[in-house]
Image: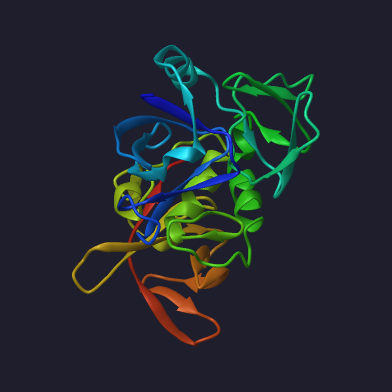
Amino acid sequence: MNYGISDLSIIPVRKEPAERSEMVTQLLFGEHCEILEENENWSKVRLAFDNYEGWVDSKMITGIDEALFQVLNKELQVVANDTFNLVFQDQDYSNKLIVPGSSFPFCDLEKKSFKIANKSYFYQGKVSENSYGEHLRDSIIESALKYFNAPYLWGGRTPYGIDCSGLTQIVYKLNGIVLPRDASEQVMVGDTLTFVEEALPGDLAFFDNDEGKITHVGIIWDRHKIIHASGNVRIDNVDHQGIFNVDKKRYTHKLRVIKRIIQQ
């Protein structure tokens, strides 16, 4: 097979084809991918959502053909919005617990149904269908707060564990906006703001290390407040110097730039 889709709640994507290799991201339920390379047990994939590449256990991927892959690329994204959603396979007694940001392909909003490959599902809970308009910034903050206190996990994209750029990417996905996976890529998107005082809720703040490499990102909430994943998803103070951790009572991240993705 040259294309695949996730029929599992969460699939770890690893740097190398080995269980002990670090997880670099996760493929969520309903997200699809191109298969670039295969060996006996592993498949190197490129995620259609953000073009991120890594290795997955081949047994975890459900194969699809190129025609379906291309249709999925063009389809309007409908994603799970509640902190937890239950989905039920048609004519099957089992159910699956789905995390926010999961995709529901070929979704019928009236019947609350969707399809993955040749399987039909029904869902409970709310979905996002990219229609927030003038309330988009409020919706982004509401989405971010759903992850409050979620533990930090390198490569994570779920309430069970999430990293800083995973948080910003999924929060934006829940609101119909596609961001790259890593902070070093996300910083290339949007318009640069000159002063932190210009920032509005939903703008992204980026932070660098001593070598000038972007290593952290967070979501501006209110004036001088930021939501970010560092140890856990938390709210801290932010100013022109960087993030001031209210528990440690010191600056932990050095501000590099603030970017505006939402033009409203």
Horizontal side, residue 171 vs residue 207: left or right: right
Identify whether 102 is placed above or below 206.
above
Horizontal side, residue 91 vs residue 81: left or right: right
Q: Mark yes or no: residue 261 visible.
A: yes
Identify whether 114 is placed above or below 49.
above
Q: Locate residue 193, reporting x and y percent.
A: 35, 52
The N terminus appears in which quarter of the rendering? Answer: top left
Q: Nearer the viewer, residue 104 or 248?
A: 104
Residue at (37% x, 73% y) in the render: 253
Identify whether 19 is placed above or below 103.
below
Residue 4 found in image quarter: top left
Q: Nearer the viewer, residue 198 or 138?
A: 138
Residue found at the far front of this picture: 40
Residue at (41% x, 81% y) in the render: 251
Q: How many marks?
A: 0
Q: Locate residue 170, reporting x and y percent.
A: 52, 46
Q: Locate residue 256, reporting x and y percent.
A: 30, 63
Residue found at the far bottom of this picture: 249
Horizontal side, residue 139 vs residue 246: left or right: right
The coloring applied to the image is rainbow
Identify whether 132 is placed above or below 242.
above
Residue 136 found in image quarter: top right
Q: Locate residue 167, reporting x and y percent.
A: 51, 54
Q: Nearer the viewer, residue 72 or 17?
A: 17
Residue at (46% x, 78% y) in the render: 244
Residue found at the far top of this picture: 67
